[in-house]
Image: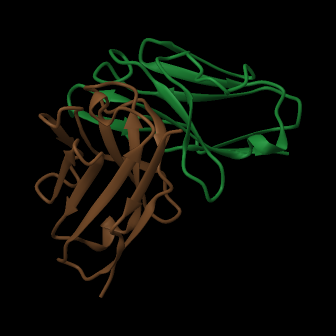
């Protein structure tokens, strides 16, 4: 059974940083791209970033480029999202999701339960 | 403003059929597969359709989809109250080199 478990969220002040983690199980982690998707309160889904199975290629939404960094440790079956220079508009539930492909971050066939990041003073 | 355009809401009675549209451009839907997701209230999204028209195992055949050019459509037949959810289309955008979602469509089963 595929499981994705996010952690690392919480309340942070504007300009602050967090590192989100997603531990995966139930599949060969290194064989699939992994994606972060977020959802602001009461809003729709926003694709944030993805990383290919090897970790060699990363992609970002314009809204987070230069502030967020996605990475993965295939030896630990773990996906990360380093979020820096946080803004109020980054407040959202962040989902970790498994892609069906090794190299493309969509489509997403399994999703974690989500972790809330709140940016507020 | 989402790159992919969906109607904000649709509604239909139980047992009826509803369609949800997703419109994009040549840089996204025109040259990439579309996928569809269902998000029930308070839960994580679930993959309904991938590669334009394929259903993952466990997704009933009441859900179907198609794509033509820069537009895609999700169809749901035999509507049930349990189908009330938000539905999203998604694809890759070659110009943005990023994934993109539609703005979402709220389905109400009257």
- On the image, the x and y values in percent for residue B31 come to 32, 15
* Residue B93 or residue A32, whichever sits in front: A32
Q: Is residue B59 left or right of residue A104?
A: right
Q: Is residue B1 visible?
A: no
* Residue B42 or residue A62, whichever sits in front: B42
Q: Can residue B22 be seen in this view?
A: yes
Q: In this view, does A86 lie above or below B34?
A: below
- On the image, the x and y values in percent for residue B67 come to 51, 14
Letter of the brown chain: A
Please state, as top left, top right, bottom left or bottom right, where the C terminus of chain B lies in the image.
top right
* Residue A6 or residue A50, whichever sits in front: A6
User: Drawn colour of chain B?
Assistant: green
Identify the residue at the far front of this view: A75
Q: Is residue B69 above or below residue A6?
A: above
Q: Residue visible at 83% across and 44% down?
A: B81
Q: In this view, does B20 lie to the left or right of A24?
A: right
Q: Is residue B1 above or below residue B18?
A: below
């Amino acid at each position: 059974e595929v499981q994705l478990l996010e952690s690392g969220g919480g309340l942070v002040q504007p300009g602050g940083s967090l590192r989100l983690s997603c531990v995966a199980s139930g599949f060969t982690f290194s064989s699939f791209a992994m994606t972060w998707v977020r959802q602001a309160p009461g809003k729709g889904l926003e694709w944030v970033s993805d990383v290919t199975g090897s970790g060699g290629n990363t992609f970002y939404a314009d809204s987070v480029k230069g502030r967020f960094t996605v990475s993965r440790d295939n030896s630990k079956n773990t996906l990360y999202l380093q979020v820096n220079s946080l803004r109020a508009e980054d407040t959202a539930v962040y989902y970790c999701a498994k892609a069906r492909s090794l190299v493309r971050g969509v489509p997403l066939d399994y999703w974690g339960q989500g972790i809330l990041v709140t940016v507020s003073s | 403003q989402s790159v992919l355009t969906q109607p904000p809401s649709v509604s239909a009675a139980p047992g009826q059929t509803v369609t949800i549209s997703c419109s994009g451009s040549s840089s996204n839907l025109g040259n990439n597969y579309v996928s569809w997701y269902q998000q029930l209230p308070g839960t994580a999204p679930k993959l309904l359709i991938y590669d334009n028209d394929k259903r993952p195992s466990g997704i009933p055949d009441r859900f179907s989809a198609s794509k033509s050019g820069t537009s895609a459509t999700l169809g749901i037949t035999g509507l049930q109250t349990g189908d009330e959810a938000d539905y999203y289309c998604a694809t890759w955008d070659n110009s943005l080199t990023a994934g993109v979602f539609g703005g979402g469509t709220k389905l109400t089963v009257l």
